[in-house]
Amino acid sequence: MIQVIGLEKINDMLSDLKSTLSPQAMERHLNTIGNMTQNVIEESFDSERSPFGEVWKPRKPTKKRNDRKLLYKNSYLSTQWQTQATPDEVIISNNTKSPKGYPYPAVHQFGSKNVEARPFLPIDENSNLEPKLKETIETYLQNAINSAIR
């Protein structure tokens, strides 16, 4: 599991919201935040870039022509993302494994001895959330707080 740091403002906003909303309403808000994050992940696969804008390294040349997008061999990694929310947390996951049993997401996010890293998660090497996504979440939460106190 990967934990994101530097979310103090978001956590404070979530606490404020939680004190005024029902558990069902909180779950809906956390689900929305999870979907925002999942959309950023899926966009990385479509654009073949990290959420920070870094272009993924191309495949090594082979004799066989290969026009498919990077990391789309069986599409599990790009399409099997799940967002699960409760009133207290949101989890975005993908438990896809290779035929040999290694976890595809971690290998492609961080790279390995034989695989180039092609990051798709909206966190940097210091576990900080991608700034545009962080700002989008903060704006969303501020709007939700303003609506809740009206």
Image: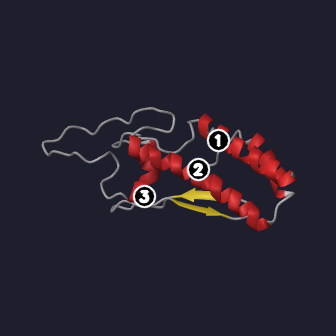
Query: Are discs 1 and 2 less than 8 Å apart at CB?
Result: yes
Residue 95 sits above or below residue 118 on the image: below
Residue 103 horizontal/vertical position (percent): 44, 56
Residue 71 sits above or below residue 99 on the image: above
Left-right relation of 102 to 134: left
Instruction: Tell me which label, 3 or 1, sits earlier in the chain.
Output: 3
Residue 88 horizontal/vertical position (percent): 74, 61
Question: What SS does tag 1 mark?
Answer: helix
The image quadrant where one finds the N terminus is bottom right
- The residue carrying mark 1 is 136
Task: State the separation of the CA atoms marked 2 and 3.
Answer: 15 Å
Instruction: Tell me which label, 2 or 3, sits earlier in the chain.
Output: 2
Say how many tags the image has.
Answer: 3
Left-right relation of 140 to 73: right
Left-right relation of 23 to 33: right
- The residue carrying mark 3 is 79
Question: What SS does tag 3 mark?
Answer: helix
Tell me if residue 1 can be seen: no
Instruction: Tell me which label, 1 or 2, sits earlier in the chain.
Output: 2
Residue at 39% over, 45% down: 46
